[in-house]
Amino acid sequence: MELLLIRHGLPVRRELTEGIADPELSDEGRAQAQHLADYLEREQIDAIYSSPLKRAHETAQPLAGRRGMPITVVDGVAEWDRNSSEYIPMEELKAAGDPRWQQLASGEWTSQDETPEQFRNRVVASLEHIIASHPGQRVAVTCHGGVVNAYLEHILGLPASGGFFYPNYTSIHRIAASTRGHRTIVTVNETSFLRGTGLPMGVVQQS
């Protein structure tokens, strides 16, 4: 089967004094999600899954809407900072010279809820369950940069680091998964559909 791990689109910035931020997509993020749906128009998609966080679920909506398919929410692919009271896009932190940018860029772990190993274990368990449920099919999972990192680290046999590369907004990461347990990374940071749109891609590539 083919697993498509898709990072969410660009969310709004949200900083709260208490409670969980859980931001929705920005206008640019919604446009990115529409371009993603356009790009995948001609591909067979057999099921669509999403993290419970708004930015991921809203990213899946254009793809699901065009196909008349439900979005199945999977708690196990929520981001490691799901309970944070703030969400600031990384490029804003970088532009401001915020020290939190260096923490994120270096993979420094700041979650108080899980260790990197616990986070990866739940991500891997959730994605492996999805894989086992769809032999011979193609499945899309809208999720988060940390989730993508955790699963690719697992496939590559790397230690749980909290992040070894930066996935762009609405980037697709394809994994071929056999029933014998073989996992092969096919593409990483697939975002050609955003080129020429003027939409942001992230801190690594420009549109």
Image: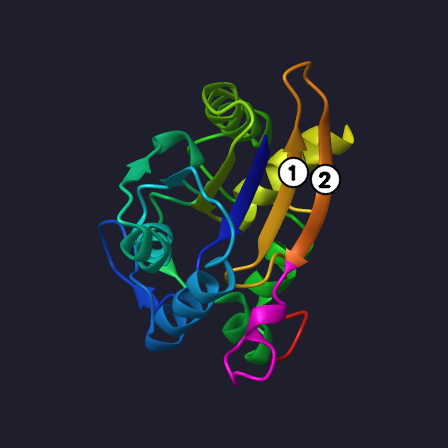
Q: Please rate how many residues cluster around mark 2, counting C-alpha atoms within 10 Å: few if below 14, some from 14 to 19, many from 20.
A: some
Circle 1 is placed at which residue position?
175
Q: Is residue 8 left or right of residue 196?
A: left
Q: Is residue 97 left or right of residue 154?
A: left
Taking the view exactly as shown, the residue that stands out farthest to the right is 157
Q: Is residue 197 above or below residue 163?
A: below
**What is the number of the mark on residue 105?**
none
Q: Is residue 32 above or below residue 170?
A: below
x, y (%) of residue 21?
28, 55
Task: Tell me the amino acid under the disc marked 1.
Answer: Ile
**What is the number of the mark on residue 185?**
2
Question: Which one is earlier in the sequence, the residue at label 1 or at label 2?
Answer: 1
In front of the other: 176 or 170: 176
In front of the other: 143 or 14: 143
Badge 1 element: strand
Write down the region rendered in magenta: 190-202
Q: Are the residues flagged by discs 1 and 2 in contact, CB closer than 8 Å?
A: yes
x 55%, y 44%: residue: 4
x, y (%) of residue 32?
44, 70
Q: How is the structure coloured here?
A: rainbow
x 57%, y 58%: residue: 171
x 30%, y 55%: residue: 61
Quarter in which the C terminus is drawn: bottom right
Quarter in which the N terminus is drawn: top right
Task: Please tell me whether residue 72 belongs to the stretch shown in magenta.
Answer: no
Q: Is residue 32 above or below residue 67?
A: below
